[in-house]
Image: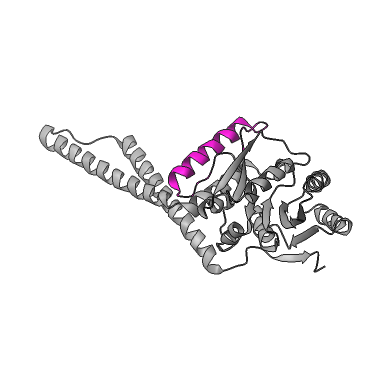
């Protein structure tokens, strides 16, 4: 019998965990032809998430858990879960039931057929999200797909079921600055997409603020594209050409027509504009250098405090 590993990163999910466990067990019962293991990764939660996971482990031997020494982020949680997974097929899901467990039987049948290596999901709408957040999310997908070679589908969720071979390829990418949506696309493999209507959280509050999502999007762009560096260079070249043309214009205007160059306010504006462009270029370069700096430190991506086998 095939073994399916369900990887569930958790951060302060004590309210959502009972409902999620109930639904995932219900789905597992509907698939008697396979075995399951549920790997919950406690990402340094400050509530009773870990205590609840320990209770579920005592109640159900299929439940495994990994607890971090502090909050390392969802990317670290997914990586730890994928490394711990023993299954022939591995799925990544959120604990808030925005990823419907009911899709798993069809996803498993798709991958099991051998035609696809991965069954992934995407939302067809963003119902329940603030309009400004939805707008910037759509813009992000447009920008990153134009800049990056990795295919990142608009509305793609982390919820997907993968073959062991694909998971091994993902784990071979040991970079510190991780952006899983880009990694999933970069490693390739044949993927079938399942679309579903957006579902709201079953309980609790989202941990993703607008600022955190913005930072995460910048991580994705920097991790899978060097286009911002080219844009910065092109902007500098264009401004230099424009400055040369303007210098020639004012030189001819002064020599031929005897019109002295005036306009202190316009000069201040030009200086400020050029200063802003320079700071943008330095900032872009600094972001890439900071990523290189973090990679060369070789710090662990996460630190495990305890597991179900090491209490």
Q: Is residue 97 visible?
A: no
The reply, left or right, for residue 14 in relation to residue 281 is right
The correct choice, above or below, for 185 with respect to 136 in the image is below
Q: Which of 81 and 176 is in front in this view?
A: 81
Q: What is the count of numbered marks? A: 0
Residue 201 percent coordinates (x, y): 74, 39
Q: Nearer the viewer, residue 33 or 95?
A: 33
Q: Which of 148 and 164 is in front in this view?
A: 164
Q: Nearer the viewer, residue 33 or 92?
A: 33
Residue plotted at (43% across, 55% down)? 285
Quadrant including the C terminus: bottom right
**Residue 129, quarter of the rendered image:** top right
Residue plotted at (34% across, 50% down)? 233
Residue 194 percent coordinates (x, y): 62, 40
Residue plotted at (88% across, 59% down)? 58
The reply, left or right, for residue 247 in relation to residue 297 is left
| Residue 139 among those drawn in magenta | yes
Q: Is residue 169 visible?
A: yes
Please state the extent of the stretch shown in magenta in the rendering.
Answer: 123-152
Quadrant including the N terminus: bottom right
| Residue 306 among those drawn in magenta | no
The reply, left or right, for residue 45 in relation to residue 231 is right
Residue 116 percent coordinates (x, y): 58, 49
How is colour applied across the structure in the image? one colour
The correct choice, above or below, for 19 with respect to 173 in the image is above
Residue 301 percent coordinates (x, y): 63, 63
């Amino acid at each position: 019998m095939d073994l399916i590993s369900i990887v569930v990163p958790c951060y302060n999910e004590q309210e959502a965990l009972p409902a999620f466990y109930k639904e995932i067990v219900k789905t597992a019962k509907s698939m008697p032809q396979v075995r399951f293991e549920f790997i919950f990764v406690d990402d340094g939660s400050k509530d009773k998430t870990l205590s609840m996971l320990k209770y579920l482990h005592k109640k159900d031997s299929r439940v495994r858990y990994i607890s971090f020494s502090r909050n390392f982020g969802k990317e670290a949680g997914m990586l730890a879960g994928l490394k711990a997974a023993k299954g022939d097929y591995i799925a990544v899901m959120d604990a808030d039931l925005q990823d419907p467990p009911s899709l798993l039987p069809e996803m498993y049948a798709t991958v099991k057929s051998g035609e696809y290596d991965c069954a992934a999901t995407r939302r067809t709408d963003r119902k329940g999200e603030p309009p400004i957040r939805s707008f910037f999310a759509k813009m992000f997908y447009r920008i990153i797909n134009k800049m990056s070679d990795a295919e990142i589908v608009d509305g793609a969720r982390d919820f997907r079921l993968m073959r062991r071979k694909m998971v091994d390829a993902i784990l071979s990418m040991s970079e510190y600055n991780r952006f899983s949506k880009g990694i999933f696309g970069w490693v390739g493999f044949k993927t079938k997409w399942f679309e579903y209507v957006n579902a709201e959280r079953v309980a609790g509050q989202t941990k993703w603020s607008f600022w955190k999502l913005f930072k995460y999007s910048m991580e994705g762009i920097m991790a899978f594209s060097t286009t911002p560096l080219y844009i910065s260079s092109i902007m500098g070249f264009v401004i230099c050409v424009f400055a040369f043309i303007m210098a020639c214009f004012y030189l001819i205007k002064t020599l031929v027509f005897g019109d002295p160059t005036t306009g202190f306010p316009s000069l201040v504006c030009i200086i400020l504009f050029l200063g802003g462009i320079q700071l943008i270029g330095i900032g872009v370069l600094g972001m890439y250098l900071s990523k290189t700096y973090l990679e060369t430190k070789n710090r662990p991506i996460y630190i495990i405090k305890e597991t179900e086998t090491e209490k």
